[in-house]
Amino acid sequence: YPIAKEDNPLFQKFKLSTDYFYVCYAGNIGLLQNIETIVRASELLREKAPDIKFVLIGDGAWKPHLDKILAKMPCENIYCFPMQPMEEIAAVYSLGDVGLVSLKPDITRFALPSKTWDILATGRPVICEIDQFSRLSTLIEKGHCGYSVAPGDAESMAARVLELYEHQAKAHEMGQCSRKYIETCLTRQRAMEHYCGRLYAVHKGV
């Protein structure tokens, strides 16, 4: 569920000002994710839009490599924090004005990032770094919930972030579409209706 910035305890916990525009990735920092694209996007926007801040929350096999990269670059606009307890999930995914999903090429052939639904549930637009042929890419674009960019395309990610920063009314509208999609399509009741409908179809031999 959405939590407003002024009510989100993570801003105080992380010592972050609520005055900035935040782009948040939260979850596994592993080998299947393309976190380096996010880092490059932050570099592209560091001088162009200093009020945009990137926040990475999580841990994983690629985290030590991320730490080495961040240690060698100016970090005025990118912050890294450890994984938070599960009970903080609403606060975590509400922290960003925009949520990020990041995957390497072809991963959507066998996996879908569940964090997408967490981001949408908090009423935030999402930028998905995923295969452009994937069903998730189509869903996000057609649902007006955000944008998808090709894996490794830091320039497009930075451009989409900048667009949402410069047109925050549009970002808010996309966030409303995100929440509406969750409420109309992905509630437990809706899932059970689909599940029971499939079972009934099998029973009737449809």
Image (cartoon, rainbow, N blue to C red):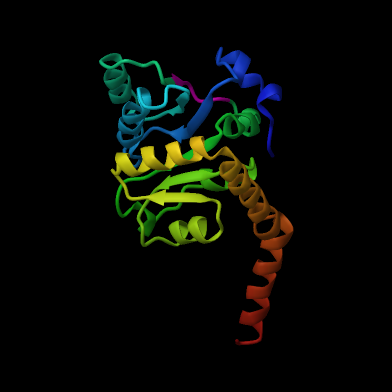
Q: Kindly give the residue lying farthest to the bottom in the view shown.
A: 205
Q: With respect to residue 151, does 23 lie above or below?
A: above
Q: In which quarter of the image is residue 192?
A: bottom right
Q: Main secondary structure of the magenta part?
A: loop
Viewed as shown, does residue 200 lie left or right of 164? right
Which residue sits at x=65%, y=26%? Answer: 5
| Residue lying at the far right of the rendered structure | 189
From which residue to which does the magenta span run? 80-84
**Residue displayed at 42% across by 43% down:** 160
Residue 19 lies, in percent from the top left, at 58, 20
Assign the C terminus to one quadrant of the image.
Answer: bottom right
Q: Which residue is drawn at 36% across and 45% down?
A: 103
Q: Where is residue 42 in the image (x, y as percent from the top left)?
A: 36, 28
Res. 61 in view: no
Q: Where is residue 52 in the image (x, y as percent from the top left)?
A: 46, 26
**On the picture, is 128 further left or further right than 117?**
left
Locate residue 82 relative to residue 2 in the image: left or right.
left
Residue 7 in the image, given as x and y percentages of width and height:
71, 24
